[in-house]
Image: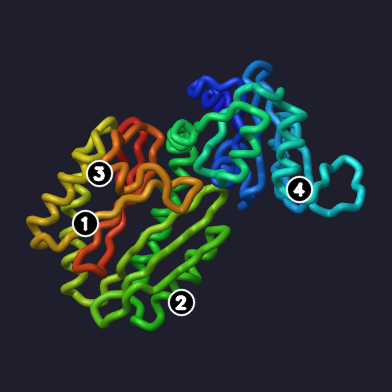
Amino acid sequence: MNIELLKSLANATNSDSIMIIGTPNVCFIARVDIDRDNIVIAYRRTTDECKMLVPIDAKEKLPISLQGKCSIVYYSFDLREREGYVIGRNFEEILIGFLKSFIEPNTEIGVPFRYIDSALAQILHKYWKIKDITKSLISIRAKKSYEDLENIAEIFRFILKILRELRELQNHNIIEEYFKHVAKIVNAIYIEPLAISKDFVSIYTYIKKGIYRLSFKVSIPLSEDVKRIIEITDDILEKLLKNVITGSKCSDVYRNIVSRLDMYNGKNVYIDVCGVGTEVCEYPSLSDFLYGDCTLDSGMALVINVVLRKLIYLPKLIIVKEGIVVI
């Protein structure tokens, strides 16, 4: 559990108390690998205390490191009496009881509106003054530790190594072999063929390892023509990104990539951007790159997918530390 993150979030939003609900937020702050929307952290800034609400069937998944950091309340929808557990007929009923035991009614609670529905928001509003902290929460999640950034980079390096080896295989074996090798290092993997031809194989990959989710599209060349296209594009992209510095405006980076690649590919290039984190695609997204006030700040991890000729994909992982690391 990272109490400092909770404190930073409460201070950044000037909230007396905050409630963090569901994945990916609880995953990131509590460092728990539980895919649940009905797991909650409440934090009270005045006393620097936190309390967690956890489904009883997820009890075994909570790491020992949480003990002593947060008081934990387990709950069940089973109406039989169970000593030490909160029991209720629905999640809203349990949640309100949990919050009332920790946060005084009519005080202010910072809540990420993006992760709750309107019905729950109305119930919360009956008892507390609630305000939206979604933007601040996403901003905090976007900044990973150096250890987390290195773990993400290692996953990507390992996959690129596998892809290089798979170029020697026959077409019909590639997807099966790719799945077999990648599955050895991750908690969960989903692979979908996007295109299979005599010249290349394109694959969508979703990976879950620990608290992080990584998704990207990649093509394996099966002909010398496609191999050459990918190699030249890769070289151009590598040189471009190595000249990017921390603090660069995202929209400038995007425009530079597109204009340079268009010169070689004849305006037949599309760029997608996906932040790597506890969601499949989080901050910064393509819209953040193009229209937001996004800058490449330390702690970020993102995948830039270059799409050539509509079905040939070249992914690049960008890690932002003191400078920019391109993988």
Secondary element type, mark 3: helix
User: Which residue is pictured at 48% across the width and 36% down the height?
Assistant: 134
**Mark closer to the chain start, 2 or 1:** 2
Query: How many angstroms separate mark 3 from mark 4 (CA)?
Result: 42 Å
**Mark closer to the chain start, 4 or 1:** 4
User: Which residue is pictured at 75% across the width and 32% down the height?
Assistant: 71
Query: How many angstroms separate mark 2 from mark 1 (CA)?
Result: 25 Å
Proximity of marks 2 and 1: CB atoms separated by less than 8 Å: no
Q: Residues within 10 Å of mark 3 (few under 14, many from 20)?
A: some
**Mark closer to the chain start, 3 or 4:** 4
Looking at the image, residue 208 lies above or below residue 152: below
Q: Between tags 4 and 1, which lies in front?
A: 4
Query: How many angstroms separate mark 4 from mark 2 (CA)?
Result: 35 Å
Proximity of marks 3 and 2: CB atoms separated by less than 8 Å: no
The residue labelled by disc 2 is 176
Picture coordinates of residue 2, whole percent (x, y): 60, 31
The residue labelled by disc 3 is 290
Secondary element type, mark 1: helix
Picture coordinates of residue 242, whole percent (x, y): 22, 42
The label shown at residue 234 is 1
Proximity of marks 4 and 2: CB atoms separated by less than 8 Å: no
* Residue 222 visible from this viewpoint: yes
**Mark closer to the chain start, 4 or 2:** 4
User: Which of the pair 90/137 is nearer the observer?
Assistant: 90
Direction from residue 78 to residue 71 in the image, left or right: left
The residue labelled by disc 4 is 59
Amino acid type, residue under disc 4 in the picture: Lys
Secondary element type, mark 2: helix
Q: Residues within 10 Å of mark 2 (few under 14, many from 20)?
A: few
